[in-house]
Amino acid sequence: SVFMRSATYAIILTACASVAHPATMLLDNFDADAQGLSQTQTLNFETTAPGSNFDLLGAGFHDLFPGNGNYLDLDGSATDPSTTQPVEIRTKLTFDPGSYLLSFVLGNNAGYGAADARSNNAVMVTFGSYTETFNLSGMAAPLTIFRNVTLGGMSALTFSNPFPADNAGVILMQVGISSYGFDALSTPEPASMALMGTGLLGLALFHFRKRK
């Protein structure tokens, strides 16, 4: 019926207006950070475990992956091999509840300049309730990962090395977090409420004219 079509159209308009455009919350390729061994923080990340550190490598400085700019070796040169704490870094930012697209690029340090480096390494990625472990071996090509994540509370993104330290670990090349803004569907914005009101007003006028 015309009434049902009008009602459906009003609902679709309201829903579309409620969805925010994706917004980039974090995009870091580490090129703005100074290279160096045994680092504890970058512009956007910091270590959390006592005594843990990472190496910031790249062009002209222990470059494992030429042409990829700067990147982190998550098992830093000064990490104490006897420590029971995992090497862990996290974002300095915490992120609001909502729906996000998480992306990151991983590589592996299979032993460049480190005689005791293992050829197999792993990293555990945690973002809210999302947790996944990636195992890498050899000097394979960089791996790009995309994951859709919904946060139920304020959360930071963490990367941790579950293996004992050996000064050569998983390589983190780039990290991106984009917000979808899906939560707007549950609480329409003022503009959306106005659009819904316009749609309902149109329906009322339609029925008034039909009755006349």
Image (cartoon, rainbow, N blue to C red):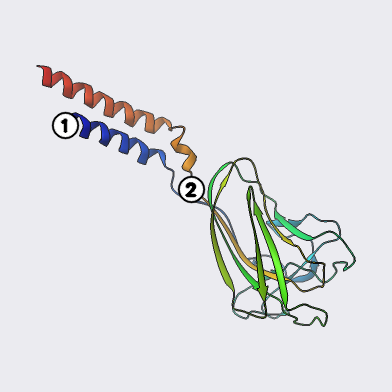
For the residue pair 58 and 173, the one nearer the viewer reads as 173
- Does the CB distance between marks 1 and 2 fall below 8 Å? no
Tell me: residue 72, above or below residue 199: below
Label 1 vs label 2: CA separation?
33 Å
What residue appears at the point 70 percent right and 57 percent down from the top-left corner? 45
Residue 21's spot in the image, x, y percent? Answer: 43, 47
Place of residue 129 in the rendered image (x, y in percent of width and height, measured from the top left): 63, 48
Q: In the rendering, at what x and y percent does residue 67 appear? A: 59, 79
Q: Amino acid at mark 2?
A: Tyr
The image quadrant that residue 207 belongs to is top left
Which residue is found at the position 43% from the left and 33% from the top? 189
Q: Provide the residue designation for mark 2.
A: 180
Earlier along the polypeptide chain: callout 1 or callout 2? 1
The image quarter containing residue 154 is top right
Q: In the image, what residue occupies the spot 46% across and 50% down?
A: 22
Residue at mark 1? 2
Q: Quadrant of the N terminus?
A: top left
Check the picture and name the quadrant holding the C terminus. Answer: top left
> Regarding mark 2 in the picture, which secondary structure is present there?
loop
Q: Which mark is residue 201?
A: none
Asked where in the image residue 202 lies, by quadrant, the reply is top left
The amino acid sitting under disc 1 is Val
Query: Does residue 11 lie above or below 114 as drawn?
Result: above
